[in-house]
Image (cartoon, helix red, strand yellow):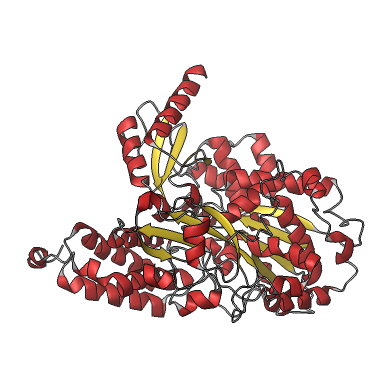
Amino acid sequence: MAERKVLLERYDVPNIWELDVYRRHGGYATLDGLFAKSPTDWVEEVKASGLCGRGGAGFPTGVKWSFLAKGTGKPTYLVVNADESEPGTCHDRRLLERLPHQLIEGIINTCYAIDAHEAYVYIRGEYLEPYQRLVQAIREAEAAGLLGKTVAGQDFPLRIVVHRGAGAYICGEETALLSSQEGDKGQPRQKPPFPAVAGLYAAPTIVNNVQTISTIPHIVRHGAAWFAGINLAPESKSPGPRILSVSGHVQRPGIYEVETGTPFEELLYGLCGGIRGGHDLKSVIPGGSSMPMLPKDVILQTDTSFESIRKAGSQPGSGAVIVMDETTDIPTVVWRISRFYAHESCGKCTPCREGNPWSVKLLRRFVDGTARAEDLRILVEVAEAMEKNSFCPLGIAAAWATQGALKHFRHEFEARISHASAIAAGD
Amino acid sequence: MPVLSDATRASIREAAGQYPPGRQKSAVMPALYLAQDDAGHLNPEVLREVAELLRLAPVHVAAVATFYTMFEKAPHGKHIIDVCTCVSCQLLGGYDILAHLERRLGIKPGETTPDGRFTLREQECLGSCASAPVLQVGYRFHEELTTVKVDALIDELLQEGADG
């Protein structure tokens, strides 16, 4: 099976990040028909396409747009979430580096649909090169009259400001991102109110991920029915092409754009060339490091549709597929994942701030083989407390990583319980 | 007596102008980046000056600066080497790369070489998972690393120092 390249169709065109090259390859063609329809028509079109957000939560994009508060007397903002930080995820970076104009075209399309005249792109700080590419592309678009007081000669002003993050995973959570952009510490806010009602500067705001916005021009150009038809899984309500970052123990790691419903077996053994060095597959995390891992026999019965991944007991998340072969020590992997969340906890709520470091300490004992019998029970309890009581998805999903490993690979943890260490109490 | 150059102070004011009227607080992160580029790291004097330029409480600017890992609060070497050891890099030898650099540079993560050339750090996911293992030098990516590639990179950086 081949990839289904839509967003990545022009990826390999030399210098595609330059305006002239992008235009020669059909770039900005959507601006010809965009203004002929009303903004509401476009919201309906995106709703009808079935596009679900690509960032992690998977919420239907058009439905989100339709929640925008009207008649508030305040401006409406679009904020593009380019704070790609979920371990395993690296495709938005490539979209920003190589196809910044596709994103800008999507921003123009979206801003017209939601009647916004100011858009912000919040990009993770470590993405210095993608940031520079994007800023350069915006300058080119401004000089060409595609942004500014008018867009392509239409009475529609639009400005894009790029805001650099500075190394905080939590800012990928939309309300933390808004706090950060407002100049505060990036900590999440209570929802409701949702950003569509009171977001950036307490004004109605749509926060969408880079890949989601980069998809919009293709829906504008080819229509909702075309997009909805890109779906191999008849029961799936999350159609379209989706870019997955495949990392870990495959022959050919990379970013792959596949049709919804592509079996993982075809992705891993076809597109990615199978497992490295003739090894056997052990486990796959299908949606970024905080999603529950699935063992070989389950993942090979699963496809990439949101519904199939959920049915298998995990989540599609950020689309980061992390592959582990038979040589992988699961407690060591989970310890490292847990350390990430401990480092990135923003400190706002106790279950996440305290639970993550506690999990790391416990997991380290399983790595070292010094775990006490009760450590497994405590690990389960801490994860449950985090899942049930954390303020935002960071703490909740951090627990999922541990829970997924314990569900399928509990024996690996049990094998590390040291009876000698049980005597040396206290630690 | 300002610590920051006139050019930096002007750039900070300009950054504040990117945001809607009355929202100059949004400029705190761009301002901290500009100040850091100028002063090398964000000491209390620099933070106070940023606060003054943006008319913010110094404690607020300090709170923001300490929340984010990319704002340097202490002096560091000429080249900051950030090695990713997070899960995708871990699976493909990120810790071996880090250990190799520790031996080569003779320092532990978080330390700076006595000649002030290199600061070594262990990092969380850098977003280059499909090209693992990776590191960044001054936020420029170096991907699909091997110990041979790492040695060549260090040699190159040392050469750069010798030329400069």
Q: Up-down: is A218 above or below A10?
A: below
- The spot of residue B72 in percent (x, y) is 47, 44
- Residue drawn at x 35%, y 59% is A280
Placement of the C terminus of chain A among the 4 image quadrants: bottom left
Residue B21 visible from this viewpoint: no
Left or right, residue A294 beside residue B29: left
- Residue drawn at x 88%, y 57% is A150
Q: Up-down: is A77 above or below A368?
A: below
Placement of the N terminus of chain A among the 4 image quadrants: bottom right
- Residue drawn at x 43%, y 69% is A300
- The spot of residue B44 in percent (x, y) is 48, 45
- The spot of residue A402 in percent (x, y) is 34, 69
> Which quadrant of the structure image shows residue B104?
top left
Closer to us: B81 or A404: A404
- The spot of residue B59 in percent (x, y) is 51, 55
- Residue drawn at x 51%, y 17% is B163
Number of numbered discs present? Answer: 0
Residue B83 visible from this viewpoint: yes
Left or right, residue A296 beside residue A62: left
Closer to us: A84 or A194: A84
Q: Up-down: is A121 above or below B47?
A: below
Left or right, residue A232 beside residue A23: left
Outermost residue, top side: B163
